[in-house]
Amino acid sequence: MCFFRAQWIFTTHTTWRTVPNIFFFNLFRTFSPSKPAKSLHTQKNRQFFNEPEENFWMVMVVRNPIIEKQSKDGKPIVEYQEEELLDKVYSSVLQQCYSMYKLFNGTFLRAMEDGGVKLLKERLEKFFHRYLQTLHLQSCDLLDIFGGISFFPLDKMTYLKIQSFINRMEESLSIVKYTAFLYNDQLIWSGLEQDDMRILYKYLTTSLFPRHIEPELAGRDSPVRAEMPGNLQHYGRFLTGPLNLNDPEAKCRFPKIFVNTDDTYEALHLIVYKAMSAAVCFMIDASVQPTLDFCRRLDSIVGPQLTVLASDICEQFNINKRMSGHFEYIWKPAQLLGRLMVLGFLLRRAPIDGGAPGDGNAPVDGTIDGRSEKEPQFKFIYFNHMNLAEKSTIHMRKTPSVSLTSVHPDLMKILGDINSDFTRVDEDEEVIVKAMSDYWVVGKKSDQRELYVILNQKNANLIEVNEEVKKLCATQFNNIFFLD
């Protein structure tokens, strides 16, 4: 990966031959200014290009997969699988690299203004030396294109408890500018703008939380911590910040993040505090340096209340995990009365049990009509471009090193190909494909929403597949319009 602005700034390895290609793409953009080319295909590798800021280019070179065969005379022959890599997937990964860098370092231009090329190079080397080691390109797929957020479905009373908790915390801790609340790696509330929350969510769920992974649910996350004298016992602890509040020499260092970089350009300290499976992110102005006394006060205020709240959510989670569906709504901070009015309106359209809107008893095992089999009848990926809500029954739980899927890579590639087809047209459409393995793959695009379904019905015909997808939409997405 390399970066430059009129001159070479930084490279993670020797890729000097990519430099002329940048100027080639600048020339090509003259003929297609609205849709410039983003990749260059060669036999051995593929080069991806991104201009996240004016005159700043990022280049990522990915080697094509290879297979070894033997020639007629017994000599090994290497064949490059040039069509195995999906341009849109890895272009999205490159964009995520920039977004993650910007979250923790600000923009390239700001670094140049603060300290010139030298400072920018230092920041690039420091960040990407560690970050590139966390990229597992072999497991990147459709979800990397979406970069979505998984929202936790809630009943109205539990949601109001969380909203009340956030209001109390922001009132008690007046220096807090923004708050985000997550449970079981799913977002419930965010005060940040959508694009900032999207990349922060990715950092939390793929980096910070996996590093602190622990048994979840039912209050078995961690033993009750010994507290300062006079404080209530609780399960709360800092994921960023001081490790031991009883140590007078403890350092209160929190990661600095940058948000609203296109507007107010705010630098914030990120405080992540967790109790059981509930995590709350407090963001305060970077000009304010949190002290150990502040951290102790936050712990004494937030810890006991978050522990109780996490237990309440856990009860609701045990109900929701038997249900299925999407709760796509996320509220921005506003007056409480306004929130209650909006909530009341939305809840008239969605069940209070957090299940699929319009169907409180939808199965979650991926079977039609609740049939139980060793392999589910269908698996799906859903994404809403308007609020970034995503849901996947294809992807298993993330590990600290990789995101695992429950289907064959060939099927994932078909999903990526369908998505590429969708991006070429503005109209709503539907694509149905039968794979070589006899699985049926269906893609539906409608009203800024996309649904991808993999059906395990080898003997079904096109009409039967279409009917099964309609059943899926009726049970899982009853309040969402999909073009028939």
Image (cartoon, rainbow, N blue to C red):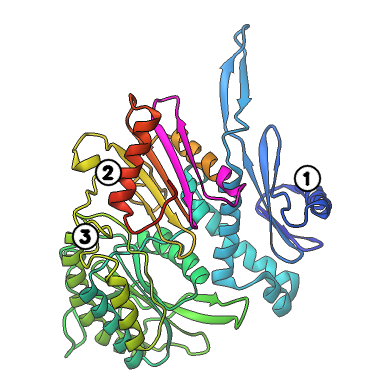
- Near mark 2 (Cα within 10 A), the count class, few <14, some 14-19 or many ≥20, is many
Residue beneath the point at 79% across and 53% down: 29
Q: Helix, strand or loop at disc 3?
A: helix
Q: Helix, strand or loop at disc 1?
A: helix
**Residue at which label 3 appears:** 320
Is residue 372 found left or right of 259 in the rendered image?
Answer: left
Please report whichever mark, 1 or 2, sits nearer to the chain's N-terminal start. 1
Q: Judge depth for marks 1 and 3 and give the one in front.
A: 3
**Residue at which label 2 appears:** 366
- Amino acid on which the number 3 mark rests in the picture: Asn
**Residue at which label 1 appears:** 17
Please report whichever mark, 1 or 3, sits nearer to the chain's N-terminal start. 1
Q: Measuring from the top left, give residue 206's x and y in whole percent.
A: 42, 58
Q: Judge depth for marks 1 and 2 and give the one in front.
A: 2
Asked if the stretch drawn in magenta spans residue 426, the answer is yes
State which quadrant residue 312 falls in: bottom left
Is residue 473 found left or right of 144 in the rendered image?
Answer: left
- Residue 160 seen in render: yes
- Residue 246 seen in render: no
